[in-house]
Image (tube, grey):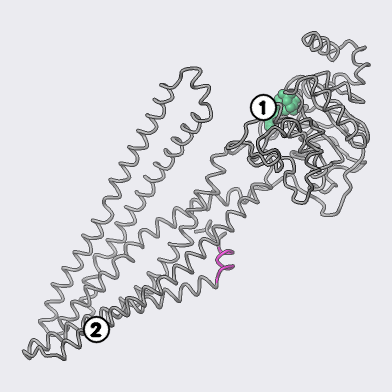
Amino acid sequence: MKNLLHLNKYLLKYKTLLIIGAIFILISNIFALYPAEFVRHAFDNIQVSLTQNNLNKSIQYTLLKYGGLILLFAIMKGIFMYFMRQTIIVMSRKIEFDLKNEIYEKYQNLDISFYKKNNTGDLMNRITEDVNRVRMYLGPAIMYAINMFFLFTLVISKMFIINVSLTLYVLIPLPILAIAVYFVSKSINKKSEQSQAQLSTLTSVSQETFSAINIIKIFRNEKNSFNRFYEECKKYKNRQLKLVSVEAWFFPLIILLIGISTITTVYIGGLESFQGTISTGNIAEFIIYINMLTWPVASVGWVTSLVQRSEASMQRINEFLETETTVLNYTSKDTKIQGNIEFIDVSFTYPDTGIQALKNVSFKVKENETLGIFGKTGSGKSTIANLITRLYDLDKGKISIGKKDIKELNLFQLRRNIGYVPQDGFLFSGTVSENISFGKNDFTESEVINAAKTAEIIEEINQFPDKYSTLIGERGVQLSGGQRQRLSIARAIFINPSIYIFDDCLSAIDANKEKLILENLKEKIKNNTNIIISHRTTSMQHANHIIVLEDGKIIEEGTHENLLKLCGFYAEMHLKQTNKNT
Ligand SMILES: Nc1ncnc2c1ncn2[C@@H]1O[C@H](COP(=O)(O)OP(=O)(O)OP(=O)(O)O)[C@@H](O)[C@H]1O
Ligand SMILES: [Mg+2]
């Protein structure tokens, strides 16, 4: 139960609901208890009437009275059961809501390297499937446990008062029932987990087919694709059949054991009644008690297996709730994010792969100037952007912005002031306007339009069916690679940052458009500190200074003209690229 202790803070938060719920459970059990006694009185009255051979009007009235009472108590019990669910189950849903939010918030604070280590399916499962299992502990398990406690105490003490030996006899099959149900439930849970896992595989297979449907069609891969689906579907069916075969044991088992208890009650009760220690009405009363105890006893086994399952799920959740974030914000003060960016002897190794991406890199970008970073694929260009935005913290050396070490700057302000255009222009499903104004609530339409204008995407947006309200992404307009890149540029321009980092974001844009965008940007970025990353020399021509990276090291640097004169790697690449273009 150690892992479930984390939930105590929530149980404490909603203690009022829990306590009121427990009171409702107690009241509903009291109402459930008396009808058995009414049945006994009714039976005993009939017996008396029969022996006196006197079935007159008064016995009819008595029976009607007990019938009415049984009905009234059943209604009252029902009402309190409704309240019991309205408190305890509502509490579990509230905790589920809080826990999901706690997990999501933790997700957003965790380092990027955490995401490299865990796959998306696993992360999704924790916030959905695992939380759901934990909720089964907070709701049904707690509710049935409290219910069981009250019912047992009330019913068994009542039974003992009536007749001790009869009680002992009829209770014997119940522990066997609890143990049997525990094993059946455990097996059901295991089988249903296996079938759930297969269902996930099946979903991934079909999802892959839908997203790659054009490739499947062109390569005429339909048959293979169908066979794959068929095989996975068959596995799923087999697992479901296994599950059904175990589930089929559940109710027959319960009915068998109630049957044994009932027969014992009638037999032993009959003997006792002959001896005159109990009345025949008591036998009827006992049969009702046995039936009342059956479900709670069965639920002991069920609840135990629920608790075990949620314990395992909570362990998975705790595992990463306890994961430490290494990239931390060290100050809550306002820190100005402006000025020269300087790298002094910076080295960096990716913690998850051990790849050394930067080796003793030093450079300086002055405020109001633009640095070009040029290099082949994998040379470490994006890594520089990752370090400035503090997605990762460097191992060796120093990075400063406006003479201050970046670790001394307020992390959130730092990120808010960087207009970062990533290499793979990722867009969210939503409208064009939402994608440009990403995360900001108070803005004017003209700000969005201006950003779109600078990024040279305005013409296309105006042709979309609903202009800035057009939905993009899965259920909306599909954008080309170049359009996506330009929308990402607009997103960075929109926040009006003091630092711009353009990570190879012009690669899918033709030379003419590229030139236009760079011209537009010139005015916008002239008072900022800017970095343009590219493996196209044409994008470098606007930079005041260029560094050329290879294998994590700076191999050449200077202005475009100087680098050409140097006749080194940069000049060679420029020659190749411009020849290709003409
Ligand atoms: N998140 C990461 N985790 C581990 N290793 C990484 C990660 N990102 C990059 N690397 C490795 O670091 C090295 C430098 O990568 P980087 O992304 O900085 O290259 P790049 O110059 O931006 O290349 P490209 O032009 O293809 O974008 C590569 O060897 C790459 O495999
Ligand atoms: Mg890159």
In three-dimensional space, the C-alpha distance between marks 2 and 1, rounded to whole angstroms, equals 78 Å
Residue 506 occupies quadrant: top right
Which residue is under mark 1?
A: 480
Instruction: Classify 490 as above or below 212.
Output: below
Question: Given the image, on which type of amino acid does mark 1 rest?
Answer: Ser
Q: What SS does tag 2 mark?
A: helix
**For residue 55, which quarter of the picture?**
bottom left
The residue that mark 2 highlights is 66
Residue 517 in the figure: left or right of residue 248: right
- Identify the residue at image location x=93%, y=41%: 403
Q: Residue furthest left?
A: 53
Q: Residue 541: where, in percent of width, then height?
A: 88, 21
Q: Amino acid at mark 2?
A: Tyr
Q: Classify mark 1: helix, strand or loop.
A: loop
Residue ID at (90%, 16%): 563
Q: Which circle marks residue 331 in the picture?
A: none
Magenta run includes residue 14: yes
Q: Look at 89% across and 47% down and name the residue there.
A: 336
Question: Which stretch did the figure color magenta?
Answer: 8-15
